[in-house]
Amino acid sequence: MFRRHDYEAERVYCDRAAVDPAQPQPHARLAAWLSRAGRLAQAREALQAGLAHAGRTDGLHHLLGLTLGAAGDHAAAERHLVRAAEQRPAHFEYLRDLGFLRGAAGRLGESVATLRRALALSAEGERRFGWLVRLGERALAERGVKRAGEVRQPRRPPRPRGRAAVIERIVAQDPEVAEALVAGADLEPQTAETLRAARRALQRLVAENPTYPDLHFGLSVVAEQLGDIDRAIHEAEQALHLNPRYAEACLLAVRLYEKTGLTEKATRHCRTVTRMRPGWIDAHLRLGRLLREQGRTGEAAGAYRRALEVDAGCREARQHLETLEAALVGEGGDA
């Protein structure tokens, strides 16, 4: 049975996160709410915004790691789980989930070593998961590995001097940070310097990995924030060329084409998003607005009807549909 989305509750979560952005809990609760509503991309954005603003971020890194791991992005998930564990090395759940992730990625030795560290912190953890570590050690022994040792941490590069250099280094290690910087740009006193540093790091990564659509997407988001709309459009389209099912990049292109007045292209891309993600009510609402502004009354009404199929309680779609239907009746037929 379809569960109607509660916009009032969502607004409360958003307001709490906006009122005190330095606290991690509101961001985490908003992300959990969005996840339950099936809006995973927006849940991820909420966590990234929290990472940009919150003072204590171990819990947010942990949640984002679990979200990315569930989506199959083990490399990105591990980066966030490692950061959570670095911030709170005595936290059983962080090490446990990091160990599980490494096991899911097929790195049994590292998984067993990490889980052993976790179990040393919790008697309850040993009771519940000790058998799993012993099973892993037995598998390692059968492979000829006597004991899974501690994972050697790579040496960290020397800390660069200057704010811009630090930002470049961070983004080079974790490109997703660039999107979080954009989300927090209005709160950042040195926004332009920060974003230019992120752009330099992303440009180098794109040059080294030209077939990675996520890198093109991140570069597009940063270029847009810096006002380089032509470059932003190019990178969004490149992400779509590499992954034609990249709905987030397609929706980004819609926004960029709207900014440049290319309404037809924006409309075409928005239709594509609604086909790829029919459950994204915001895409239907945006398509309805685009069509309505072009005077395409019948098509706009259709977009709002599809929005109401997703959520029958959407007030915005209901109001616009009633207005458009009244206009159609006045015209004596379909527009």
Image (cartoon, helix red, strand yellow):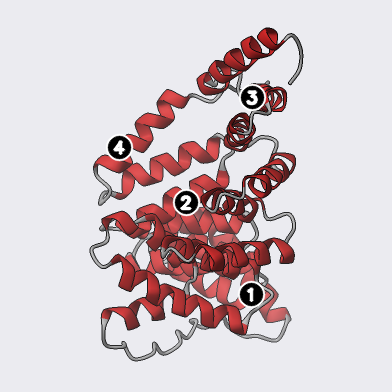
Mark 4 belongs to which amino acid?
A: Arg
Mark 3 belongs to which amino acid?
A: Tyr
Upstream in sequence: badge 4 or badge 2:
4
Instruction: Decide: few, some or many residues near mark 3? Use Cα within 10 Å; few <14, some 14-19, many ≥20.
Output: many
Instruction: Decide: few, some or many residues near mark 4? Use Cα within 10 Å; few <14, some 14-19, many ≥20.
Output: some
Give above or below for 160 relative to 7: below
Q: Nearer the viewer, mark 3 or mark 2?
A: 3
Upstream in sequence: badge 3 or badge 2:
2
Q: Which residue is mark 3?
A: 304
Quarter of the image where the N terminus is located: top right
Upstream in sequence: badge 3 or badge 1:
1
Callout 4 touching callout 3 (CB < 8 Å):
no
Disc 4 element:
helix
Q: Which residue is mark 2?
A: 45
CA separation in Å, label 3 and label 1: 48 Å
Instruction: Decide: few, some or many residues near mark 2? Use Cα within 10 Å; few <14, some 14-19, many ≥20.
Output: some
Disc 3 element:
helix
Mark 2 belongs to which amino acid?
A: Glu
Residue 213: quadrant of the picture:
bottom right
Give above or below for 206 relative to 78: below
Callout 4 touching callout 2 (CB < 8 Å):
no
Q: Which residue is mark 1?
A: 107
Give above or below for 300 relative to 98: above
CA separation in Å, label 1 and label 2: 29 Å
Image position, residue 62 (x, y; %) = 44, 57
Image position, residue 48 (x, y; %) = 43, 56
Upstream in sequence: badge 4 or badge 1:
4
Callout 3 touching callout 1 (CB < 8 Å):
no
Upstream in sequence: badge 4 or badge 3:
4
Instruction: Decide: few, some or many residues near mark 1? Use Cα within 10 Å; few <14, some 14-19, many ≥20.
Output: few
